[in-house]
Image: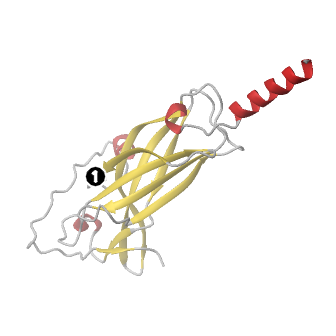
Amino acid sequence: MNSRLGLAAGLALAATSCRTPEPKALLDVSDVDAYWAVEPTMGGEQYIAPAVKFRLHNRSETPQHSVQAMAVFRRKGEENLSWGSAFEQAVSRKAPLAPGHSIPVTLKSDARYHSQGPIEGMFGHPQYRDALVEFFIRVGSSGWVSFGRVPVERRIGARSVAAESGVLAPSPPAASPGAPSPSSPSPSRPH
């Protein structure tokens, strides 16, 4: 009889420990910032890529050992198409996220705009399209869960970096469709 009780207790414990994690019950995000990141110049071309940065907070009572983050970037007017994406192993067994702690996560798209003109001119070019980003979190064996969808601001650099440097420039205004521009941004993806 005691062996049956022990077996039942062991099975019950195993069943609860194998339950699929629920990311929104374990984690939350704050300080979401979507912006444009400058990439290295190549062959005289300037590059900018959309990025999203946020703080990932463990609100559970247990350390998290496997958390992945993913972002899907879309251009306005093409919301049904994926323009670019990013992926990061945010938390691993080697560096678990303790209860009550948080970490910064930055996801930069593999899609980008490029131009021979100045970076600031890209936002005003008629071929430029604003972008949106939706970001997802997965904990262990869970499925991907959306934690937010925000527009990418017409701003170079993260808000936190600009604030620390004392320079938080406003987003450049949109140019009228017929306005001349020294740059000719073209969407690109790495080869």
Residue drawn at 37 percent across, 79 percent down: 44
Task: Examine the rendered structure and indicate whether residue 56 appears above or below residue 81.
Answer: above
Nearest the eye: 79 or 157 = 79
Position of residue 191 measured from the top left corner of the image (x, y, whole percent): 48, 79
Give the residue at the far front of this rendering. Answer: 1
Nearest the eye: 41 or 25 = 25
Secondary structure state at the residue bearing disc 1: loop
Position of residue 119 measured from the top left corner of the image (x, y, whole percent): 29, 66
Residue drawn at 25 percent across, 49 percent down: 169
Picture colour scheme: secondary structure
Left or right, 107 with reference to 134 = right
Q: Quadrant of residue 74?
A: bottom left
Task: Examine the rendered structure and indicate whether residue 131 appears above or below residue 40.
Answer: above
Q: Quadrant of residue 165?
A: top left
Nearest the eye: 77 or 8 = 8
Position of residue 38 measured from the top left corner of the image (x, y, whole percent): 39, 62
Give the residue at the far top of this rendering. Answer: 2
Residue drawn at 56 percent across, 26 percent down: 100
Specify few, some or many for label 1: CA neighbours under 10 Å numbering under 14, 14-19, or 20 or more. many
The amino acid marked with disc number 1 is Glu
Per the image, the residue denoted by label 1 is 153
Nearest the eye: 188 or 1 = 1
